[in-house]
Amino acid sequence: MNPGSVGLARDHGGLACYAVIEDGRAVLRRVPCEVERTVADLRAAPLPADVIAGLVRVVTTGGLG
């Protein structure tokens, strides 16, 4: 099972998702994600500008488009 990527939530605007198994079934949990801090960290990272821009877009909009 893959509930998504905690640091790159692509739905629910800023809520990270993870899964736990309870009583034999998977339960999805959502927790707040520090979007502004993540964006600041990305902008400070030694990555190409286009990569940073793409990641910032995913983090802030929840999508690739």
Image (spheres, grey):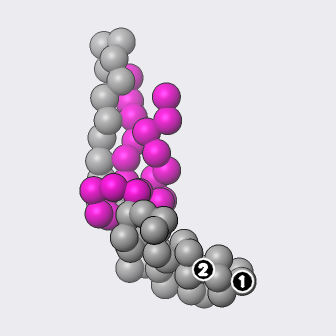
- Image label count: 2
Q: Nearer the viewer, residue 14 or 20?
A: 14
Residue 26's spot in the image, x, y percent? Answer: 35, 24
Range of the magenta residues?
Answer: 1-21
Q: Give the left or right position of residue 50, taking residue 65 as reference.
A: right
Q: Residues within 10 Å of mark 2 (few under 14, many from 20)?
A: some
Q: Quadrant of the C terminus?
A: bottom left
Above/below status of 30 relative to 50? above
Residue type, numbered disc 2: Ile
Q: Residues within 10 Å of mark 1 (few under 14, many from 20)?
A: few
Residue type, numbered disc 1: Pro
Res 19 quadrant in image: top left
Residue 59's spot in the image, x, y percent? Answer: 44, 69
Most extreme residue toward the front is 65
Residue 20's spot in the image, x, y percent? Answer: 38, 30
Q: Residue at x 48, y 59 (%)?
A: 7
Magenta region, main secondary structure: loop
Above/below status of 8 relative to 27? below
* Residue 51 belongs to the span the image colors magenta: no
Q: Residue at x 71, y 80 (%)?
A: 47
- What distance separates the C-alpha of mark 1 from that of mark 2? 6 Å
Pointer 1 with pointer 2, Cβ within 8 A: yes
Q: Residue at x 47, y 60 (%)?
A: 8
Identify the residue under disc 2: 52
Residue 54 visible in rendering: yes
* Residue 11 belongs to the span the image colors magenta: yes
Identify the residue under disc 1: 48
Q: Residue at x 41, y 57 (%)?
A: 9
Q: Give the left or right position of residue 57, taking residue 49 as reference.
A: left
Most extreme residue toward the top is 24
Kindly state the secondary structure of the residue where label 1 is placed. Answer: loop
